[in-house]
Amino acid sequence: MGNQRQIGREYEKMAAEYLEACGFQILSCNYRCRYGEIDLIAKDGEVLVFCEVKYRSDTRKGEPAEAVGIKKQQTIYKCAAAYLQEYGIGEMPCRFDVISILGREICLIRDAFENQDKYGAQMFNEK
């Protein structure tokens, strides 16, 4: 499992470099809280972006972004709320992106999933 973690870190680093090349400012890598982890937190202009990185060497198990299911999204929401509270961030537009890496091909999926709770209420303000 340690090797998988090391591989994951390498692709997260690649994703961070990709975001920086796209003009994002990386604020945090592997933000951890009691709810779990968010791979990358960045600013895209005035928008705070919570980003999940998914890598697959091929599509035998599906596209990388398909691995960000409802349970993972809920974890990301909770971690994002913890980050906002920890850093005292009030009114700021937020977005949830996925970076899909298939082989060596990187794809940024902006607004990859909705930021709603189980009742459909907005959990974060959107741009």
Image: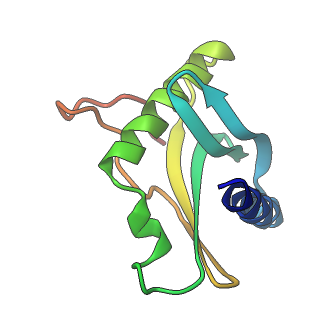
Q: State the image quarter where residue 111 is shown.
A: bottom left
Left or right side of 123 for 95: right
Quadrant the N terminus occupies: bottom right
Name the foreground residue: 70 vs 61. Answer: 61
**Looking at the picture, does residue 107 appear above or below residue 44?**
below
Q: State the image quarter where residue 17 is shown.
A: bottom right
Residue at 60% from the left image edge and 82% from the top image edge: 57
Name the foreground residue: 40 vs 89. Answer: 40
Residue 88 in sight: no
Residue at 46% from the left image edge and 86% from the top image edge: 59
Q: Where residue 89 appears, x then y in whole percent?
A: 63, 19
Residue at the extreme left of the image, as rendered: 119
Q: Where residue 80 appears, x then y in whole percent?
A: 53, 31
Residue 104 in sight: yes
Q: Where residue 19 appears, x then y in whole percent?
A: 74, 61
**Looking at the picture, does residue 68 appear above or below residue 73?**
below
Indicate how the structure is coloured in the image: rainbow
Residue at 48% from the left image edge and 39% from the top image edge: 76
Q: Where residue 25 appears, x then y in whole percent?
A: 80, 47
Q: State the image quarter where residue 32 is shown.
A: top right
Left or right side of 94 for 67: left
Residue at 77% from the left image edge and 58% from the top image edge: 6
